[in-house]
Amino acid sequence: MSFVGTVSRGIKAPIFKKGDNLVQMVADSVLKASEVEGFKLRDHDVIGVTEAVVARTQGNYASVDQIAQDVREKFGDNPVGLIFPILSRNRFSILLKGIAKGTKKLFIVLSYPKDEVGNPLIDPNLVDEKGVNPYSDVFTEDEFRELFGKISHPFTGVDYIKLYRETAGGECEIILSNRIETILDYTPYVINADIHTRRRTKRILLEKGAKKVVSLDEILSKSVSGSGYNEDFGILGSNLATDETVKLFPRDGQIFVDKLQQLMFEKTGKKVEVMIYGDGAFKDPVGGIWELADPIVSPAYTLGLVGQPSELKLKYLADTVLSEITSEQEKEAELKRLIKAKKGDLVNEKVSLGTTPRRLTDLLGSLCDLTSGSGDKGTPIILVQGYFDNFASE
């Protein structure tokens, strides 16, 4: 019987640069770690590689001017409304710089008291104290400040209204509203900047009479003047690279994960699974911020990671079918028997109650993101072992 379950290891790696052979370098890093640290690779191990290094080695970058050019080509000289961007210096301020540069007049609608991923613009308790209905009440910037006073993010201290107005510069007006159609009081030409609700927002705007609606996944969905691009996600999932450039979400991810899986098999004889991971899907319990600012947790993964876990709830079994068994050996034997006999699909079965059927890639991607961190750990590669093991595994 194995006495260790899932193990998640951060694998230190070189600083990757454009043009590097990432497949080879990731394989070398994992194999070197295995040799030095004394662990063995097994079938069904999972190698996660952060999207950042995939995009960097691809050279998938774009400049503020290239974003501006694409926006200008889509909207011409028409005044443009920008609705529901997230509050982020790293994620959105550089995109705003490009969008504003591509327009002559920009109206920005910010949601309140928080953005789509939970970043608070103001304390939600103030909304209640002031008797405001966030589902219907609309404010100009001056009205909002007069009502709520000082505006600063609890973690960063940033006044995002001020930051976004100054970043946009020129002809920019900020409105505070959670009503999608509010922007149509100002212009029928709209960029909807929300991430996970973008399709619904776009549909509603078009139904309400918008003349043109472009989502962020449609900006730089193809190369503009030699820029990077992403045909599926555009500038969604991008990150600040420099004051004038963004690193886009990686493309051709399936080619990368399949090649890495094949190389690892050639080198070790083991069939590992491979995934590219971005933001995990979890919520900070103090700040209320969702981590998932990327459009998807994993943009590419090998076939063995398709699907959802199918697991028994051991706590339920311990309190029910195993509760009358007094011998520990018999309990263990019966539990192993139940696990080995379980059906492939346990949805709505009592024995699986409490095991939320989430996708493997969302669970593993979140584990990888938490393991690698976002600072100076230097572990953009994650090796997860034993994830598919259970109590009955030998």
Image (spheres, helix red, strand yellow):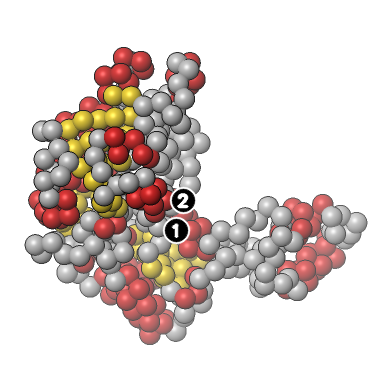
Q: Are the residues tagged 2 and 1 within 8 Å (C-beta)?
A: yes
Residue 87 visible at all: no
> What percent of the width, then of the height, locates residue 25?
27, 70
The image shows residue 140, relative to residue 54, as above or below, that is above
Point 23% across, 56% down: residue: 219
- Image quadrant occupied by the C terminus: bottom right
Point 13% across, 61% down: residue: 224
Point 60% across, 59% down: residue: 357
The residue singled out by tag 2 in the image is 281
Hey, what amino acid is under mark 1?
Answer: Gly
The image shows residue 214, relative to residue 124, as above or below, that is below
Question: Is residue 264 left or right of 231 when viewed as pictured?
Answer: right
Q: Earlier in the sequence, mark 2 or mark 1?
A: 2
Hey, what amino acid is under mark 2?
Answer: Ala
The image shows residue 108, relative to residue 301, as above or below, that is above
- Which label lies toward us, 2 or 1? 2
The number of discs equals: 2
The residue singled out by tag 1 in the image is 365
> What percent of the width, then of the height, locates residue 26?
31, 69
